[in-house]
Amino acid sequence: MSPPLSVDRQRLDVRLRGDGRRVVVLDDDPTGTQTVSGVDVILEPSPDRFESFFASSARALYVLTNTRAMPREQATAYLRSVVSQIEVAAQRAGQPWAAILRGDSTLRGHVFAEADVVGARSAVLLFVPAFPEGGRVTVDGAQSVEIDGQRRNAADTEFATDPTFGYVSRDLISWVAEVGGGRSAVMVRLHDLRDHGSVAVSEALERAPAGTVVIPEAQTDDDLRLVALGLLDAEQRGSTVVIRCASSFAAIRAGLVPRQITAIPSPAPRRILIVCGSYTTSSSAQLRALAAAGWPVAEIGVDTPIEQLVMLARARLDADDLAVVSTPRSRSDDLSLSSGATMMERLTELVRALRDDVDAVIAKGGITSAAAAICLGGQVARVEGQLAPGIALWSLLLRDRSMPYVVVPGNVGGPDALTDVLDRMR
């Protein structure tokens, strides 16, 4: 296989700036900000917020749709409403815009139903699930996930057994047919990408019939930059392309970069709430590491009165300036979106009650991060950068203050991820 090509980042940036379209990333949960900085996230979409974006000089905007937490029909209806608001605001401002559907690198979510909302049936769908920063790469026709230093086919991970978004296909062309209702797909192989550069992608997009899914293999960000150049070339020559991708490609296409946060802005938060709703294996391991470090975890049982949990959390905040709460670690095999939503309602009720008791929040899990941020009263957040790879620090704008808010994806980080973030915050 050819070695990775070195891509002139300045050349790509010039191409992006010359494109003329404003970029709106429609994020199906808040973990899509794990590779960007210096950009706003709209948590509660509204026409006036989109009008403000198009009236500004901002290059890109993230919009939290949180549709991964919704049933398919609700998700597509909500996404359609948000897209309609954006289109109206863009027309009023006389500004062209491009949509990016940001989704999960482990192949979960309403991938094709959401793509159809923005026209995938009559266009070509460019699907880019690679997330190199997180050890998720697209090679040999499949999506691979790095776990404990070992690369595994995504079909062999816990993500493939998700009760809502599970799958069995081991290669991506079969996965598209399985999950996408029999759609056809073509791969852009890594050796073609590296031998021929961006033309391998542009030709694939231009030759593909409407409704086809084009999937480029990628192992590095430079591979993804070649994909971006190929996309721009194809669009410039008249191709209509819908984009569904993981966070890395969304950032590259939007012209955004990560920023390592070395210190929390002064004054450092004193009273911190850690809240976990994710059921992944890594989430449970991180909670166990917190407990081993002397920070007990209060589980939100199905029948435990919320008032009792609030009192317990406040007592721990008073004693240690820290409270850790989570959903139960035992997860029913038949857990559905509706039952998960019921548990999340209990979690957010607790967070809402503690709003005035805390100075910062660390949220573990995508759906958890979205729900907790909104129930705190956040409508807009500013992505400051990353505390660690894949872990974003937001400034959550509340009605009376700005709160440090850390988004830790459920499938990111080793056992010490939460304890390390906590140490950085304190």
Image (cartoon, rainbow, N blue to C red):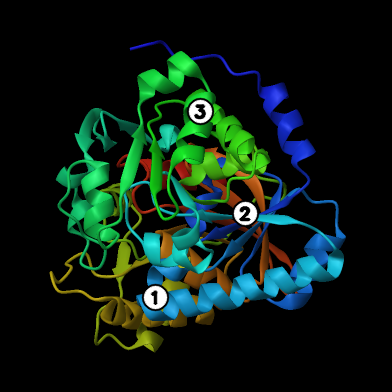
Q: Mark 1 — residue?
A: 70
Examine the rendering and report whether any part of residue 274 can be seen. Answer: no
User: 261 or 201, which lies in front?
Assistant: 201
Question: From what the image shows, is residue 29 above or below residue 301?
Answer: above
Residue at figure coordinates x 26%, y 81% from the top left: 339
Residue at image coords 39%, 40%: 215
Q: In this figure, which residue is indicated by the disc labeled 2? A: 394
Report the amino acid beneath label 2.
Trp
Q: Name the residue under label 3.
A: 221
Sequence-wise first label, 1 or 2: 1
Which is more foreground, mark 1 or mark 2? 1
Instruction: Work out which quarter of the rendered image holds the N terminus and state it.
Output: top left
Q: Tell me the residue at 29%/47% (across/down).
A: 289
| Horizontal and vertical percent position of residue 105 | 37, 46
Name the disc covering residue 190, or none: none
Q: Distance between the residues labelled 2 and 3?
A: 23 Å
Q: Nearer the viewer, residue 182 or 373?
A: 182
